[in-house]
Amino acid sequence: MTHPLAGLRVVELATDIAGPYATKLLADAGADVVKVEHPAGGDPLRRWTSSGVEVPPGEDGVLFRFLNTSKRSVAIDWTTAAGRAELLDLAADADVVVESLGGIDWPAISARNPMTSLVSISWFGRTGPWKDRPATEFTVQAWAGSTAIRGTRERPPLAAGGRLGEWLGGGYAAIGALAAAIGARRTGRGEHVDLSLLEVIHLSMAPFTTVIASFGGPSAAYGRTVEIPSIEPAADGWVGFCTITNQQWRDFLVLVERDDLVDDPDLAHYFTREPRRREVYAFIHSWTRKHTVADVIERATQLRIPVGPIGNGETVRTFEQFRERGVYVPAPDGRVVQPRPPYRLGRGALRPFAPAPRHGEHAAGWAPRPPPSSGDGGGLPFTGLRVLDFTMFWAGPFVGHFLAVLGADVVKVESIQRPDGIRLASTQQPAAERWWEWSAMYHGINAGKRGITLDLSRPRGLALAKALIAKADAVVENFSPRVLDNLGLRYEDLARENPRLVMIRMPAFGLDGPWRDRTGFAQTMEQISGLAWVTGFADGPPVIPRGPCDPLAGLHAALALLVALEHRRRTGEGQLVESTMVEAALNATADQVLEWQAYGRLLGRDGNRGPVAAPQNVYACRGAEQWIALAVVTDEQWRALVDLLGRPAWATDPELATRAGRSARHDRLDVELSAWCAARERDTLVDLLLGGGIPAAPVLHPREAAANLQMRARGFFEAETHPVTGTHELPGLPMRFSGLARWYRSPAPTLGQHTEEVLRELLGLGDDTIAELRAEGIIGARPAGV
């Protein structure tokens, strides 16, 4: 059986997580990925472990093996003239080159083959005043606004653990690469896709805060907070809750036997619970500590409160839903299990995992294939693609958002009875005119779409939806599995009318298994998958990163849709694709499961320390809430820091000369560096450290990103003029396409804005019929009851 991306040629010149994960996702779907490594030792990740365990001689680290499954490896010294020529020869016959190491540039690639695309992954992007600035994910989280909003005021700001931004960057790079390759087939021109991890992290971990501030929303002013409730102590461990809606909070109060507080307005939102945090924790914990995790989950599930166990590298494989669905599969070496790709095709097949290559195992070159067409010279990658978007909140709408900005006609379907729930996160009070149009996140992930309303609960509305689906290339939905089944929108029935239809379903836990019908949001996935387990202080509870599982799920669903469309291009077949939210998160926590099995090490949380750098922490500078993030990765950077410190006796201790030595003495380093930073002004100190080549950043609130010089220079923010909210800036995608001046061609639609247009254009409905539909409440432009 031919895999969907068979014949796609990809060169990888990358290390760490983002680049290798991007190309792994392509290899899983059948692409031929050639990993280029330097002859002297190869990819440094071969010898790296998250736990610091020394890799046995003759072996590669377990994370390297996971990220580089099913690839080939060639050894080329691209720093020499001969090696550079060999690399360019290899790239000239490729469809996509993915790089995070430099060594190859866009003018050289496009001169050799105008259809080859280049995906560059870097901390700040390959252009702009910060392009050469030293950084790590830890310092980039501080620049992006992620760190500043996580934690409590009693303790320092808290970065998310697990190198999560790099996993997200890999997902973005994968869909950027595949979109560029599809576009080149259409236009005959490749793209330089220039991805900034700063922008990835800002979008994913501090989402749309600049838009909230522009809209005048009060939440933009808050500092660091934790959600209440979130991860709470039970009688036998930790249990995770999520109360996104007010109804879920009210039901939670019933659960913990405090239904007397359901109408307390000060507790209606987690932001407003913060001033009464101690009081709220007291009554929550007095109840949760009396019950086991299993008992709490059973009781909360009966009330449809999102809830789950707190997973880690040891326990997550045993979760009943994952066992039942076979989520963890044997790695090629047979010694450990690893998460499967987080989507399942109804037709075609993904490639079975093959062992990661040995260093330099293969010869450079490609298998023969028919020459690619030169394209017709016009259009965006997805021009002509029609997508019906039946999604809500963040993860689902992301899929249509990505397709829309690259040319697809995406029609968002809501109803006046049940608008997209993210509209309720409005910056305006319910008394304001058209308050439901003032949700910053709604604007941010629905720009470029058309919007219609249809009441699917009534036969006439459902019939119209089916008629529109019959004319669509793809449908995307993220309801609970039972919803579409109850409506009668089953893929088998829809495909009889439209055999080429690709349908992406995005359940929280899957379309089968014992947790099939349970409610879950991004926070739930962070709790179950292990993402929360590695975030937080060692003496405190696990802490959710808060939100990034939404774009993580959306990225993988977008990839799954593109893979299914490639299968359709080859075979003419549509199909049903299941892209499961929690399984996307499990791929981003693969190293926890792998390290536990391979080395017996349970990765955990340790405040702002981490496995990449030592010292690594946030330190208070002169003044109130003036924090600096500092990360020393290399011994060379440590020597530079010692010089900036003035070479005090404690810093010249030979035991601190290596990262292992510094990591073992981190407590001592924190004491000394805390005193040094406390006497200095933050921004001056950041400049001093950066000037010495040492990764450092101020811990900024995400609203400050609107003034970020690097983001401004790259055109990350784009103005949109909306018929209700007026002109405001939206963040774009965290990558630039060389052939695109801007992302957004239209603002997010108002509720039902294009209903009449779409019904006339696609179904030929006339004025009288449309008037009847409006009178019956099947269509409309104002939420019912408002």
Image (cartoon, rainbow, N blue to C red):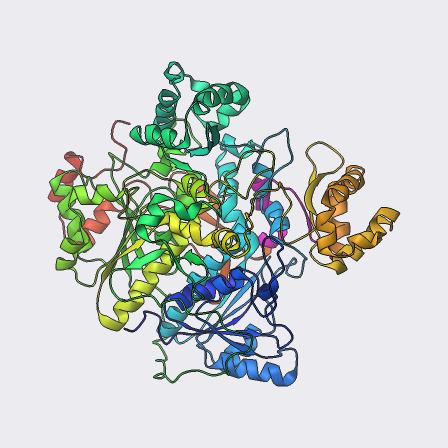
Q: Quadrant of the N terminus?
A: bottom left
Establish if 317 lies above or below 572.
above
Is residue 740 in view?
Answer: no
Q: Residue at x 59, y 31 (%)?
A: 152
Image coords of residue 73 (percent x, y): 51, 75
Q: Quadrant of the C terminus?
A: top left
Image coords of residue 389 (percent x, y): 29, 50
Q: Residue at x 38, y 44 (%)?
A: 319
Q: Check if residue 703 falls in the magenta segment.
A: yes
Front position in the image: 203 or 747: 203
Dividing the picture into quadrants, the one containing residue 128 is bottom right
Q: Check if residue 760 falls in the magenta segment.
A: no
Dividing the picture into quadrants, the one containing residue 373 is bottom left
Q: Is residue 202 left or right of residue 480?
A: right
What's the magenta region?
692-712
Establish if 459 lies above or below 97.
above
Q: Is residue 672 left or right of residue 27?
A: right
Q: Is residue 111 left or right of residue 321?
A: right
Front position in the image: 442 or 699: 699
Image coords of residue 420 (percent x, y): 32, 39
Front position in the image: 85 or 588: 588
Q: Residue at x 42, y 70 (%)?
A: 354
Image coords of residue 80 (percent x, y): 66, 81
